């Protein structure tokens, strides 16, 4: 992972005490530096903030990897994609297509013996179709 300056950052290294202390809120920092607080309590405070430091670096690393993947996607040349486009057949071409009537009749028969769908099944089907249409049209991302 690279930092803001572009240098590589080791996300597996342990933080220094100074780095952990910079994350601490004023109250925790005051407790950590107090001579009256037992060492085991100081250690708990330190370990808590150390974990936050590591989690933040790991998250930054994940975000960096995602940004890299997105950057790759953005390098796709739309002219190349456009050149590969094949338009839909014309109506004339569709009208000359062969239709397997026996398969259609088979499916019609199976639908007619299935009976009427329940209102809840129709509602669910409508929700699925509406969601698919929204995704296809880009209305829902």
Image: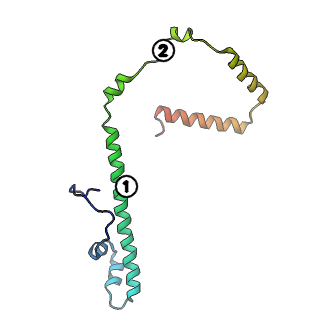
At mark 2, the secondary structure is loop
Q: Residues within 10 Å of mark 2 (few under 14, many from 20)?
A: few
**Residue 81 x, y percent position in the rendering:** 36, 27
Residue 72's tag is none
Q: CA distance from mark 2 to mark 1?
A: 44 Å
Name the residue: 37% across, 59% down. 59
The furthest residue to the bottom: 36
The residue pinned by badge 1 equals: 62
Q: Which is nearer the eye, 5 or 25?
A: 5
Tag count in the figure? Answer: 2
Q: Residues within 10 Å of mark 1 (few under 14, many from 20)?
A: few
Disc on the earlier residue, 2 or 1: 1
* CB within 8 Å, label 2 to label 1: no
**Residue 53 x, y percent position in the rendering:** 35, 68
Name the residue: 55% across, 37% down. 131
Q: Quadrant of residue 100?
A: top right
The residue pinned by badge 2 equals: 89
């Amino acid at each position: 992972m690279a930092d803001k300056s572009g240098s590589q950052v080791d996300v597996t290294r342990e933080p220094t005490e100074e780095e952990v202390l910079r994350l601490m809120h004023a109250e925790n920092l005051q407790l950590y530096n107090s001579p009256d607080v037992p060492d085991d309590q100081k250690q708990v405070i330190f370990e808590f903030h150390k974990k936050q430091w590591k989690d933040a670096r790991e998250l930054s690393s994940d975000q960096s990897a995602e940004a890299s993947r997105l950057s790759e996607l953005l390098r796709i040349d739309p002219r190349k994609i456009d050149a590969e486009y094949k338009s839909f057949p014309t109506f004339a071409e569709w009208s000359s297509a062969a239709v397997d009537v026996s398969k259609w009749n088979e499916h019609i028969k199976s639908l007619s013996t299935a009976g009427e769908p329940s209102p809840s099944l129709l509602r669910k089907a409508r929700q699925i179709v509406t969601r698919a249409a929204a995704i296809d049209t880009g209305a829902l991302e």
